[in-house]
Image (cartoon, helix red, strand yellow):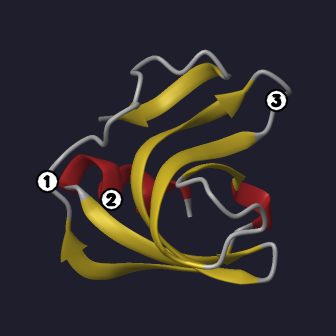
Amino acid sequence: MLNTIINAIRNRQILTFTYSGLVRVVEPHAVGVSTTGNDVLRCYQTAGGHVSPGHEWDFCILSRIRRLQPTGQQFTGSRPGYKRNDAHMRFIYEQL
């Protein structure tokens, strides 16, 4: 899973997966280790369900992601509000 996300960030590929029981379509921006020690994904959600409506940025724990797949589509670059070197990550494997 980690390698799929790293490759998606490097190649700006859109991903789809299930998280908290909801299908999501996302643009991955960074993947790393959170300050609490979990492997996490910082992503911008473009389609699918939200647990808390009204936000597009997600911070997903990798061990809770199910059915991760690249969609075959690409995105152009980082979304407004993205900050490199995410302060919520103590180590970053890959980022835009």
Q: Residue 29 in the image: state x and y as whole percent.
A: 40, 43
Q: Residue at x 32, y 56 (%)?
A: 7
Q: Write down the quadrant of residue 27 in the picture.
A: bottom left
Q: CA distance from mark 1 to mark 3?
A: 30 Å
Residue at the disc numbered 1: 76
Residue at the disc numbered 3: 37
Q: CA distance from mark 3 to mark 2?
A: 22 Å
Of marks 1 and 3, which one's residue comes earlier in the chain? 3
Q: Residue 57 in the image: state x and y as whole percent.
A: 54, 48
Determine the secondary structure under disc 2.
helix
Q: Write down the quadrant of residue 82 in the picture.
A: top left
The amino acid marked with disc number 1 is Thr
Determine the secondary structure under disc 3.
loop
Q: Residue 51 in the image: state x and y as whole percent.
A: 78, 67
For the C terminus, which image quadrant?
top left
Residue at the disc numbered 2: 8
Q: Residue at x 48, y 78 (%)?
A: 16
Q: Write down the quadrant of residue 88 in the picture.
A: top right
Q: Residue 79 in the image: state x and y as whole percent.
A: 31, 43
Circle 3 packing at 10 Å, graded few (<14), some (14-19), many (20+), is: few
Residue toward you, 66 or 54: 54
The amino acid marked with disc number 3 is Gly
Q: Which mark is residue 86?
A: none
Image marks 3 and 2: residues in contact by CB distance under 8 Å: no
Q: CA distance from mark 1 to mark 2?
A: 12 Å
